[in-house]
């Protein structure tokens, strides 16, 4: 009986005791990560002007006589030297004209000499002498014109270069002004872009600008050689010509970053950027003391800093070195200057 009472008392005591779960508090380790504030600065803006690469010297070779093509001595892609004969045109009709002009000139010369002798003997009037002189001058001019036309039966390279295109074959009838060949200089390239006239007004000859070439966007530095107004009569634009590397192939697309008026822009150090394919991001210190990957859109780079077009605000704190950060990391920023 006494043992039974002790057991009941023990159960009652256990019922009156509050059951509390066993809790273990785990302290999270917070890392100290070098950080930098997103700053806003005044920078020169940029206008992205599109254009193409072309040869700095390019000539469309033609003739001013009518005749059948006798021979074409080059093909597209051939390298040629200045003065080299590239195309010959049949000279038949011009040779006949040359003979006629030579005969007429000799006849006019003989007539002039005879008239001068007779005038000296007072057997000819001054009017007859002037007529003989005029006839000789006309015959001489005709002979020179035929001789000049004959030079156009042999088309020569105006400079060292490469044949960009061949537009005729032997047997083709050439007409005055018809393009026969196109030759380009291989030693220098010109990048030509179109920009608004207010952008062109800020450019100076010799000024260097950044240019992206081709689908790969490879960047080069090009020098302004000329700003030509009136590129498009329908709009207030200018043609900006830049001297590019000789290694560029004509016809490639080009985008030049031309300076514009100053504007406010956000920037971060290049080391803060995370690049994954075509995406760029930074590690942002969030309000819950963790780091979050924030995708951003970047613009131009200026040395070790990169312009941020969207995705951040002035005063945001980001990791200075993206390689030492990761998404979700518990961290406390240790602010440093970007150049530290």
Image: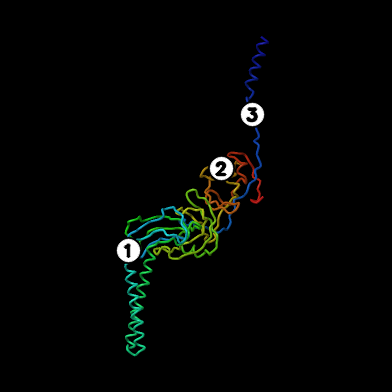
- Whether pointer 3 and pointer 2 mark residues with C-beta atoms closer than 8 Å, the reply is no
Return the residue nearer the eye: 295 or 239.
Answer: 239
List x then y, in percent, for residue 104.
32, 74
Q: Which residue is mark 1?
A: 92
Quarter of the image for residue 110 reads bottom left
Say which of marks 3 and 1 sits in front.
Answer: 1
The CA distance from mark 2 to mark 1 is 81 Å
Secondary structure state at the residue bearing disc 1: helix
Above or below residue 83? Residue 340 is above
Question: What mark, if any, has residue 185 been given in the picture?
Answer: none
Q: Quadrant of the N terminus?
A: top right
Q: Which residue is mark 3?
A: 23
Above or below residue 10? Residue 228 is below
Of the numbered discs 2 and 1, the one sitting upstream in the chain is 1
Return the residue nearer the eye: 218 or 122.
Answer: 122
Quarter of the image for residue 11 reads top right
Say which of marks 2 and 1 sits in front.
Answer: 1
Of the numbered discs 3 and 1, the one sitting upstream in the chain is 3
Q: Which residue is mark 2?
A: 293
Say which of marks 3 and 2 sits in front.
Answer: 2
């Amino acid at each position: 009986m006494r043992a039974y009472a002790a057991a009941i008392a023990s159960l009652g005591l256990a019922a009156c005791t509050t059951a509390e779960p066993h809790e273990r508090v785990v302290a999270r380790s917070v890392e100290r990560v070098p950080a930098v504030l997103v700053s806003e600065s005044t920078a020169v803006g940029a206008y992205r002007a599109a254009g193409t690469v072309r040869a700095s010297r390019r000539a469309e070779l033609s003739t001013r006589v009518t005749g059948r093509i006798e021979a074409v001595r080059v093909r597209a892609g051939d390298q040629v030297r200045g003065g080299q004969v590239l195309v010959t045109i049949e000279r038949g009709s011009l040779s006949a004209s040359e003979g006629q002009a030579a005969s007429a000139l000799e006849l006019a010369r003989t007539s002039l000499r005879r008239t001068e002798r007779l005038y000296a003997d007072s057997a000819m009037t001054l009017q007859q002498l002037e007529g003989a002189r005029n006839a000789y001058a006309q015959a001489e001019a005709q002979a020179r014109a035929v001789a000049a036309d004959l030079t156009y039966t042999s088309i020569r390279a105006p400079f060292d270069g490469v044949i960009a295109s061949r537009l005729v074959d032997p047997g083709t009838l050439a007409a005055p002004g018809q393009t026969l060949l196109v030759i380009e200089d291989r030693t220098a390239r010109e990048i030509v872009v179109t920009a608004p006239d207010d952008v062109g007004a800020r450019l100076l000859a010799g000024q260097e600008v950044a240019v992206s070439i081709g689908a790969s966007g490879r960047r080069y530095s090009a020098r302004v050689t000329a700003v030509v107004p009136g590129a498009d009569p329908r709009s207030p634009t200018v043609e900006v010509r830049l001297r590019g590397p000789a290694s560029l192939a004509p016809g490639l697309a080009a985008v030049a970053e031309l300076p514009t008026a100053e504007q406010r822009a956000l920037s971060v150090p290049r080391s803060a950027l995370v690049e994954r394919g075509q995406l760029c991001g930074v590690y942002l210190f969030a309000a819950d003391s963790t780091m979050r990957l924030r995708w951003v859109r970047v613009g131009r780079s200026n040395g070790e800093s990169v312009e941020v077009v969207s995705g951040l605000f002035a005063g945001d704190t980001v990791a200075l070195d993206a390689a030492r950060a990761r998404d979700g990391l518990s961290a406390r920023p240790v602010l440093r200057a970007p150049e530290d």
